[in-house]
Image (cartoon, helix red, strand yellow):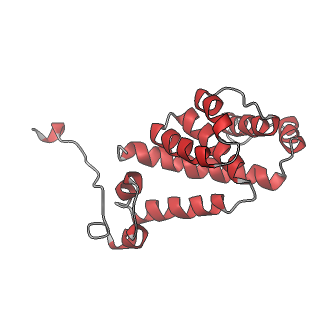
């Protein structure tokens, strides 16, 4: 194989093989994607910290998963879709939303549908969502704080999608 034909292969690291900065993140059972991201302690740590912050947001667990699945489907991240389908199966009310979320179809729950549409509008407008659409989002029971938490979720899971694709997770 010539140099031009060589593939760049990211290593699925363990606590023994990872760079020193990634080792603290690899102490227990590790998902393949996390092990691949361990090549960069900054990337792995950044994703895990952003994910932790998103999980601590005031959005309820079902709403957080609506955000993540909307992003995963839009970005075509099959790893993310599979992982978060599993999470939705464990959340009360999540199972009923899976088919529509995976297909990118409207959700049967009006509040969650308002959230799904808001995520799509934030992405489509690069954050320049018209005032009336922000009002529709808040009229559905969400807050201005939630609107910014959606942006945090979009950033976190877009970072995840791009990194997962780069390392061939």
Asked which quadrant contains residue 73, the reply is top right
Residue at the image position 27 percent from the left and 55 percent from the top: 11
The spot of residue 150 in percent (x, y) is: 70, 49
Asked if 122 appears above or below 152 in the picture, the reply is above
Q: Nearer the viewer, residue 111 or 161?
A: 111
Looking at the rendered image, the quarter that the C terminus falls into is top left
Q: Residue at x 52, y 39 (%)?
A: 81
Front-most of residues 86 and 153: 86
| Image quarter (top left, top right, bottom left or bottom right) of the N terminus | top left
Q: Name the outermost residue toward the left.
A: 1
Rendering coords of residue 151 (x, y %): 68, 49
Kindly indicate the quadrant of the structure image that contains residue 165: top left
On the rendered structure, is 131 left or right of 74? right
The image position of residue 56, as x and y in percent, is: 67, 63
Q: Is residue 80 found left or right of 153 in the rendered image? A: left
Query: Position of 36 compared to 158: left or right?
Result: left
């Amino acid at each position: 194989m010539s140099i031009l034909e060589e593939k760049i292969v990211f290593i699925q690291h363990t606590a023994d093989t990872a760079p020193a900065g990634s080792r603290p993140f690899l102490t227990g059972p590790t998902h393949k994607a996390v092990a691949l991201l361990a090549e960069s302690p900054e990337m792995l740590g950044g994703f895990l910290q952003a994910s932790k912050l998103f999980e601590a947001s005031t959005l309820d667990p079902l709403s957080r998963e609506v955000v993540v699945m909307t992003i995963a489907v839009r970005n075509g991240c099959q790893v993310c879709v599979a992982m978060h389908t599993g999470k939705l199966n464990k959340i009360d009310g999540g199972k009923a939303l899976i088919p529509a979320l995976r297909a990118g179809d409207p959700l049967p729950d009006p509040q969650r549908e308002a959230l799904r549409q808001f995520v799509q509008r934030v992405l489509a407008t690069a954050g320049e969502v018209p005032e009336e659409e922000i009002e529709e989002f808040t009229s559905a029971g969400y807050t201005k704080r939630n609107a910014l938490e959606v942006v945090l979720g979009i950033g976190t899971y877009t970072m995840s999608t791009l990194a997962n694709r780069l390392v061939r997770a």
